[in-house]
Amino acid sequence: MSQRTWFITGVSSGFGRQLTDQLLARGDHVVGTVRDVGKVADLIERFPEAFHAELLDVTDTAAIRAVVERSFARLGRIDVIISNAGYGLFGAAEELTDKQVEHMIATNLVGSIQLVRSVLPHLRAQGGGRIIQISTYGGQVAFPGNSMYHATKWGIEGFVESVAQEVASFGIGVTIVEPGGARTEFRYGSAQVAKLMPVYADTPAHSFLRMLDPKNGLAPGDPARMAARIIESVDVEPAPLRMVLGSQALESTLATLRKRIADFETQTELAASTDFPSGE
């Protein structure tokens, strides 16, 4: 196990914090971004040489570029970039405000895109590296009451899958991580909920309320084990394009993809009917 240097966004809680704790414990170096340095004061004190906190709001593209430039200039080489910053927003589409929609896109989608774009020149210059995009099995599967969250995750997965093909020849590996439900602050604390409309009270749009209440059962995913699998993936060559974490997540993803393929296969004649006839 070689010592590596990691750049991780959103390390104050959830997967970002789990990853950082495990990496520092094994002797790696981590640059971690936060919006409040106070939330990682313990790491700064315990690992003054190995951990460096950077203030960053990923909705600020200029700030992303400045932090990335500063980090590569100071460290010389960064082996792994983990794009993790993001949050959940629940509610039916019409329950969301314009401000909520815009902020979610700016954080989960545009922020992740701009981070990847900012690190690529440095990874190319150093002869390679690894990019890990934290997504969700909700990047393949859609549930009611999650429309904007899905929009950002389906969007970032398309972007990252395309980028993976663009940069493979430079020795840059790219992995999309799709965790299922896990016992993190994301699900039980930091998730935002729209101002609910009574008209949706008895519809699938509000089914997420049951999921967010721990009294109805905790999520099956162990954040520590998920973080360990993410770390281990960096030693896999070539980089796996996708990793689904959680048996429940994998089962749901496979069922959704099988249904999607079956639906497409019924459209063979329809699709062909719109082509020019052979020879034209």
Image (tube, rainbow, N blue to C red):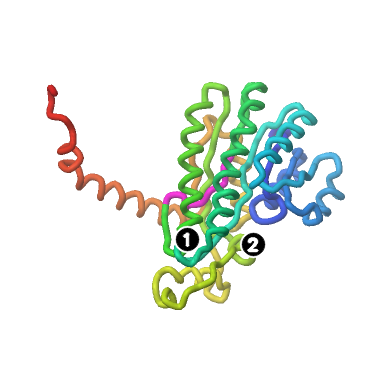
Q: Nearer the viewer, residue 101 or 272?
A: 101
Residue at x 68%, y 52% (from the top left corner): 18
Q: Is residue 23 above or below residue 42?
A: above
Query: Where residue 267 sits: x, y (%)?
Result: 20, 45
Q: Is residue 278 above or below residue 234?
A: above
Image quarter in which the C terminus is found = top left
Q: Quadrant of residue 237?
A: top right
In terms of secondary structure, where does tag 1 sit?
loop
Left or right side of 71 for 230: left
Residue at x 53%, y 45% (from the top left corner): 177
Q: Quadrant of residue 171?
A: top right
**Is residue 139 shown in magenta?**
yes
Q: Amino acid under label 1?
A: Asn
Query: Where residue 174 sits: x, y (%)?
Result: 54, 34
Query: Where residue 84 sits: x, y (%)?
Result: 62, 47
Report the residue marked by disc 1.
146
Q: Which residues are magenta?
A: 132-140
Q: Amino acid under label 2?
A: Glu
Q: Residue 185 has which mark?
A: 2
Q: Residues within 10 Å of mark 1 (few under 14, many from 20)?
A: many
Q: Nearer the viewer, residue 223 or 146?
A: 146
